[in-house]
């Protein structure tokens, strides 16, 4: 009997939320993803995940992402960018 190869966990983009350029010049992005156990709001630089939060539904995900966006803006030194680009990379 042969072992099955491990299954990749689900990480399906639902919606990009926001993007900002930080003082380092790198782009911080946030998006909502469908995962094996529900929904998750993820934020990070390129392939570096900095923050994630599981949420109950899409409405809660958008609210959480907006609160996180406001917290980042309150720190100053971040420039908002158009949503788009490669949100799938976090």
Image (spheres, rainbow, N blue to C red):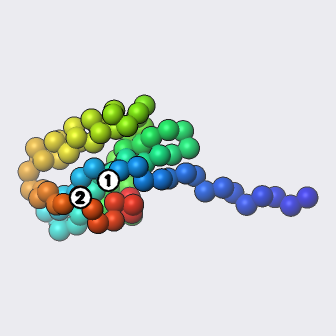
Q: Nearer the viewer, residue 36 or 2?
A: 36
Which quadrant of the figure has residue 44? bottom left
Determine whether the residue tagged by mark 1 lies in a helix, strand or loop.
strand
The residue singled out by tag 2 in the image is 83
Determine whether the residue tagged by mark 2 lies in a helix, strand or loop.
loop
Q: Looking at the image, is mark 1 or mark 2 earlier in the sequence?
A: 1
Residue 34 in the image: state x and y as whole percent: 47, 46
**Horizontal side of residue 81 vs 16, given as left or right:** left
Q: How many marks?
A: 2
Residue 22 in the image: state x and y as whole percent: 17, 60
Looking at the image, the residue that sits furthest to the bottom is 25
The residue singled out by tag 1 in the image is 16
Residue 76 in the image: state x and y as whole percent: 8, 51
Residues marked 1 and 2 touching at CB (< 8 Å): yes
The residue drawn where x is 9% and y is 56% is 77
**Horizontal side of residue 17 vs 7, given as left or right:** left
Answer whether residue 48 is visible to the viewer in this image.
no
């Amino acid at each position: 009997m042969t072992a099955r190869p491990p299954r990749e966990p689900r990480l399906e983009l639902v919606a990009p939320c926001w993007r900002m350029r930080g003082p380092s010049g790198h782009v911080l992005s946030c998006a909502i993803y469908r995962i094996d156990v529900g929904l998750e709001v993820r934020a990070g630089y390129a392939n570096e995940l900095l923050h994630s939060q599981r949420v109950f539904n899409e409405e809660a995900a958008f609210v959480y992402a907006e609160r996180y966006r406001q917290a980042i803006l309150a720190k100053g030194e971040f420039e908002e960018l158009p949503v788009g680009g490669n949100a799938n990379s976090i």
